[in-house]
Image (tube, grey):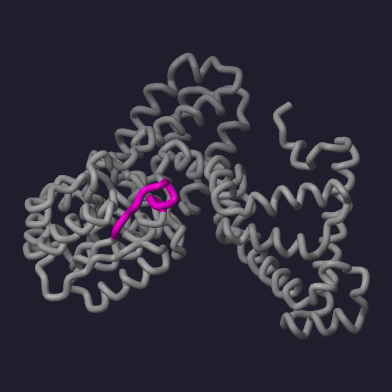
């Protein structure tokens, strides 16, 4: 996500931090490089112009030029201005009405149908009772796709064959009232480009069943085209928010940095993967940190708490304290880590990880897959008692996992190193303390 922009900004910041003092000329050079980096990232030129001017106004003041750490002060200003450009603070859905109707609109291929299911799953975790509505009667198999996704997230789907889209929405709201559903998520039809028929159909839906939210689902990888599409939909429908999909594949970041400023409509969610849990609330300040290479540890922790099995984590701590860690525990922890997504997504949320990612992403991903294959090729007895794994067993495990004996040895070696390290930490911290306590604030 935003790899090229993050790399270029990190290079600029490294040079600025390396100076003991900054002059107005130093700041001017730095801002020129930042301006070029933003333009190359496909950020709207008007947005870049205003952003750089706001940064310049603050940067030439006494707070920066006379600071003991001028580079850090300048980076702080840039971070805050980037966050403000993207909206400043998180904007939540307006779902006070019962049932609240959320209309998902956008061009064909932007990911409306999958986003509707992802949003349903997210709202369900928050305690809502959503229903999905198949109002896309244009795209072949759109209804069937939504029904399959609805079954996957255990959310009901309302569809009406041979019925006009506006009437489908009206009947879906009536169904939601009867079945005590409090959010109606409407998947609408899109086109390859904006046309009068599509807009007329959407305006009819809005007229007959006024929605609480009209969310544009836009493909982040289309850059400035996503900004133009947002402007066109907003002019006709009056959008209340935007969902940017495929943000994990957007190496530049132009849409994310431009769309809020250009349209005045907040980004409410971002799509970060193909899995059904690949939808996140949009936090402008956290996104600014990620763009600047500062990571997003808060979101990583939230995802870990939500997706990882807390009972298993507590049980693991107890086993570590008693020095009873096994390869079975090792396997379970790797499987839990997979719930957080690819290694690349975990790395990009860690501060300073931009320097490591280019060289390590594919290698770390392959290493984890090999380790999982090797551990799964072992018998339960071998995972519980690694000492019985001799030469012949290693050959069998390697054959079963499609790897080599040296790969098996590497996994066993890493396990031994982890076990020794955890034992050492546990011993230093004393009995009754978790090895995780070392992360406490001092």
277 is within the stretch colored magenta: no
Answer above or below: position of 49 versus 211.
above
Q: Looking at the image, is 407 positioned above or below residue 62?
A: below
- Of residues 50 and 354, which is closer to you in this image? 354
From the viewer's side, name the closer residue of 316 and 420: 316
Q: Quadrant of residue 141?
A: bottom left
Does the magenta portion include 124?
A: yes
The quarter of the picture where residue 364 lies is bottom right
Q: How many marks?
A: 0
Which region shows up in magenta? 122-131
Q: Viewer-proximal residue, 4 or 345?
A: 345
User: Residue 142, percent across and down?
Assistant: 26, 73
Residue drawn at x 32%, y 52% as measured from the top left: 243
Quadrant where the image shows the C terminus: top right
Residue farthest along the front direction in this orientation = 178
Instruction: Judge whether 83 appears above or below 299 on screen.
Output: above
The x and y percentages for residue 95 are 28, 42
Q: Relative to 94, is 377 on the left or the right?
A: right
Relative image position of residue 344 (x, y in whole percent)? 57, 58
Residue 143 shows in the view: yes
Q: Residue at x 60, y 42 (%)?
A: 351
Q: Is residue 318 left or right of residue 221?
A: right
Does residue 32 appear to the left or right of 176 in the view shown? right
Residue under the point 31% across and 69% down: 146
Residue at the spot 44% in from the left edge and 62% down from the top edge: 276
Q: Position of residue 287 (x, y in %)?
A: 45, 42
Along the horizontal axis of the image, is 417 left or right of 246? right
């Amino acid at each position: 996500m935003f790899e090229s922009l993050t790399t270029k900004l990190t290079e600029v910041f490294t040079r600025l931090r390396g100076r003991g003092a900054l002059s107005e000329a130093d700041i001017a050079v730095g801002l020129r490089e930042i301006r070029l980096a933003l333009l190359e990232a496909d950020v709207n030129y008007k947005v870049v112009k205003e952003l750089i001017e706001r940064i310049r106004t603050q940067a030439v003041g006494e707070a920066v030029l006379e600071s003991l750490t001028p580079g850090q002060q300048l980076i702080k200003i840039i971070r805050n201005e980037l966050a403000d450009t993207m909206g400043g603070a998180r904007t939540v859905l307006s779902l006070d009405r019962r049932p609240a109707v959320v209309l998902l609109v956008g061009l064909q291929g932007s990911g409306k149908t999958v986003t509707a299911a992802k949003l349903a799953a997210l709202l369900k975790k928050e305690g809502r009772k959503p229903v999905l509505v198949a109002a896309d009667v244009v795209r072949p198999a759109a209804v069937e796709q939504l029904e399959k996704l609805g079954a996957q997230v255990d959310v009901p789907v309302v569809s009406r064959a041979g019925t006009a889209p506006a009437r489908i929405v009206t009947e879906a709201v009536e169904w939601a009232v009867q079945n005590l559903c409090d959010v109606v998520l409407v998947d609408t039809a899109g086109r390859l480009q904006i046309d009068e028929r599509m807009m007329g159909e959407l305006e009819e839906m809005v007229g007959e069943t006024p929605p609480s939210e009209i969310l544009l689902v836009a493909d982040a990888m289309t850059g400035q085209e996503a900004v133009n599409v947002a402007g066109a939909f907003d002019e006709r429908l009056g959008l209340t928010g935007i969902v940017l999909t495929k943000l994990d594949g957007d190496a530049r970041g132009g849409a994310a940095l431009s769309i809020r400023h250009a349209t005045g409509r907040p980004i409410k969610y971002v799509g970060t993967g193909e899995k059904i849990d690949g939808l996140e609330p949009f936090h402008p300040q956290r996104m600014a940190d990620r763009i600047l290479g500062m990571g997003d540890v808060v979101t990583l922790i939230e995802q870990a708490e939500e997706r990882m099995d807390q009972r298993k984590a507590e049980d693991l701590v107890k086993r570590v304290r008693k020095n009873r860690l096994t390869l079975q525990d090792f396997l379970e922890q790797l499987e839990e880590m997979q719930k957080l997504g690819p290694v690349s997504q975990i790395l990009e949320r860690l501060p300073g990880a931009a320097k490591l990612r280019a060289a390590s992403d594919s290698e770390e991903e392959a290493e984890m897959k090999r380790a999982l294959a090797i551990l799964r090729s072992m018998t339960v007895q071998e995972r519980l008692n690694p000492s019985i794994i001799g030469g012949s067993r290693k050959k069998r495990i390697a054959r079963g996992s499609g790897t080599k004996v040296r790969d098996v040895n590497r996994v066993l070696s890493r396990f031994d190193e982890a076990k020794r390290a955890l034992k050492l930490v546990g011993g230093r911290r004393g009995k009754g303390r978790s090895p995780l306590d070392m992360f406490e604030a001092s």
